[in-house]
Amino acid sequence: MTLDDLLGRFAEIVEERDGWVVPCPAHSDSRPSLRVAVSDAGRVLLKCRAGCPTGRRTPDDEPGVLEALGMSWTDLDAVEPGEVRARAKSTDKPAGPAAVAALAADLDRWTANLISGGEQAYDYARDRFGLDAADCERLGLGFAVGLGGGPRLVVPFRDELGVPRGYQARALGQDARVRWLGAKSPDGASWAKVGWLPGQAGWAEVLVTEGPGDGLTACAVGYDVALVRGAGLAGSVADDIVRMAHGRPIVICGDADLAGDAFARTLAAELAKRGESVRKLRPPRDGDDLTDWRARNPAAFASDLTRSVASAPVLGGVAARLDAWTDADLTEVASARRLREHFEAAGSGVRYSPEAGFFILEAGVWRPDKLDGVRTAAQEVAHALWEEAADLARELEAIKQAGDPAGEAKALAARVGKLKGFAKNANTSRGIDAMVRELKALRGVAVDFEAFDRHHHLLAVRNGVVDLRSGELLAQDPGYLLTRRVDLDYEPDATAPRWEAFLREIFPHRSKHAGLPDYMRRLVGYGITGSTAEQCFAVLWGKGANGKSVLTDTLTEVFREHTVTTPFSTFEERGSGGIPNDLAALKGSRLVMAAEGEQGRPMAEAVLKRVTGRDLIAARFMRREFFEFRPSFLLLLATNFRPQFRGQDEGLWRRVKLIPFERYFAPAERDHKLGDKLLAEAQGILAWAVRGAVEWYRDGLGDPPCIVDATKEYRQTSDALAGLLPGIFIYDDEGRITGKLAYDAYLAWTDEENLPSKERWTRRTFFAALEERGATKKKGRDGVYFEGIRRARQPDAVPDHDAPEIPEEPRTPPNPLAHRQDVPITGPSLDDAF
């Protein structure tokens, strides 16, 4: 099912800035109250503003939203959002001057359309809301035909000074899928949540309505109106309404249904906290809003409304604020939700995975909560709850001292006592533990650890996110779940002349090192992509004073959060074997640096294959659960000695990129301030690496000949059997030799080469090495033998004139498999092996 399919189930759709509102199927809805949105992660969300549960049944055992729709959580999770324009995001940053100017031009154009040919809109405003033509023009209403869904009546959202801050447009036709269409927010900003409609009667009261329709209906009677864009915003618009009302009495006109009651209750509590005098007006018939009320008797509506406004009950401060605290709010789960909202209100967010704990959103990326920030926030939430309870208790005491004129002190005292008891428990270690524990399981907080840093082509920077495939700078989006950031602004045109000169200095030979500076750009660019498509690692090899450390130190500083420096021993053989636990720290990194291993110590070849491939790696952090991750980094081994590889299989050597650092800088040539000079070009080095990434995505690494040749020579000289195969043995498709003779020859050869006993292989290891080098192991009647190799004969090699002459082996071998007339080509000590 797609989101379009889901929305198609509803007869009425109201579009908002970050989603849609449709009639809730779980309760009798006079107007849409079920919010439908898409999260940053692409998940479709449902929330009833009247409080209907989404997945479970109500306390009265009535179906929740999903059950009423004939769906389950699994069905909802499977809904594909498709190409949606609205995402569940929130920002309180107001639109800038350019966006406001563009909006003003649109509104002026639509107003001109209304005056010149908007009879249909005039008729609708008159019949539906009671506005005459003069009202429409005074309020700046407009007529638009190009917004989608047919012709529309445009209602501008202006502040009290008349500055345009948004709009909503009502479809005039009955077949429009979206009735109220909101203005698309500018990038990184938001249009206002509240608009001001000036009346003409001069009444003292300011009416607050849900949405523009009721606002127009109240304004037609003469009232000044603060219209709220949607009922779900009730908790965040109090400051705007206080500013607009400017000390005048406020009357909240919610709908006569559950959603309207929740709107009035929440807003009244927020206004009461600010010391405002608040009254509540509810239409006399259940399910009606102000416009429905008017439609029942247009002629009597004006007098009915003014009478109801005058008699609307005042919501006392304590009563109004307590109305916002239902029994459902006094639970540990509700406290966890308040904790989540505490982060969101600060422009942050929180996520949790069992493998790594909590993550907190900071500057567009998710930081591991290393300093117990979640628990600190829980303490703040608990303290705020205690302050609210204590403040209500003080106000209740003032009511008692005033003689309890409304006779409400006794009932209020019980409710305040209940809130104080809950607040006291919330401030204990047990209460805070419970809040944090429940937070872990809240939908939208719990996340699979593998979901972090999954978008390898994206690189977070200070001023956004870079798409490394194109070099384009994108806006920050928490939904990417990136955990690391380059602490630099990305400027595509930034340069790094000293850095590029440095690369030419450390690879100076135009013929021998041809293409190496450009290759390093592609290699580093490939590394920061997080891709392992090349399945390779680089060995930066040189004897010292050659620029190797300056290169790795500079890259580490520029890409500090994406770089992990790990001990060389991580990739060396260990007695215990297996995958080392320090690999857990490599998850999510892009560059991994390891320097100066122990000379002669064999490398852990299986580990190197795993970390440079696409297979899952099992690891865990200290005292955490095991998790699996796929490598997303380029390994750079910087060493004065070439690492020792025993194996010769293609699976290993095709991964090796040996980069020789052959330049030696004499003491007089060394610039001890070079590191600082290079870091002064950090922004240019970032742009240089991004260009390398774009090149890699387009063309691949493209190893220059010097890398190919150096790696080939490295492989040949790293072979532990070099001199034996080829040498004592040679490759021959028709060749064959017994395992016993082969191993005896190997032992004799190790004696000749003076290999220490600890470096001599067992028969099993030696046989495996022959197979690794292409020989085929088979078992015959007389034991193991190998095909594809044989002993070298005299014509197979250049004669060694210094070696003593060796008599040819007798032609009648004792073993029928050893039938070849082979003659060793090395010293006499090997002859006994045959």
Image (cartoon, grey):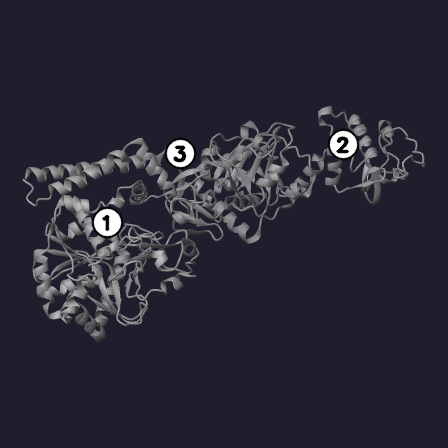
Q: Which residue is mark 3?
A: 370
Q: Residues within 10 Å of mark 1 (few under 14, many from 20)?
A: some
Amino acid type for the residue under numbered disc 2:
Arg
Mark sitting earlier along the chain (1/2): 1
Q: Which residue is mark 1?
A: 235
Q: Position of residue 238 (x, y in %)?
A: 19, 49
Q: Secondary structure at mark 2?
A: helix
How many numbered marks does the figure carry? 3
Q: Which mark is residue 763?
A: 2
Residue at 59% from the left image edge and 47% from the top image edge:
534
Q: Secondary structure at mark 1?
A: helix
User: Is there CB contact under 8 Å for labels 1 and 2?
Assistant: no
Mark sitting earlier along the chain (1/3): 1
Q: Position of residue 707 (x, y in %)?
A: 63, 42
Question: Alpha carbon of mark 1 to alpha carbon of mark 2: how far?
Answer: 77 Å
Residue 292 versus residue 88 in the image, above or below:
below
Q: Quadrant of the N terminus?
A: bottom left
Q: In which quarter of the view is residue 172 placed?
A: bottom left
Q: In which quarter of the view is residue 75 placed?
A: bottom left
Q: Which mark is residue 801?
A: none
Amino acid type for the residue under numbered disc 1:
Gly
Q: Position of residue 749 (x, y in %)?
A: 80, 29
Name the residue nearer the viewer: 782 or 459: 782
Mark sitting earlier along the chain (2/3): 3
Question: Alpha carbon of mark 2 to alpha carbon of mark 3: how far?
Answer: 51 Å
Q: Residues within 10 Å of mark 2 (few under 14, many from 20)?
A: some
Question: Alpha carbon of mark 1 to alpha carbon of mark 3: how far?
Answer: 32 Å
Q: In which quarter of the view is residue 35 placed?
A: bottom left
Q: Secondary structure at mark 3?
A: loop
Amino acid type for the residue under numbered disc 3:
Lys
**Residue 495 visible in the picture:** no
Residue at 78% from the left image edge and 37% from the top image edge:
725
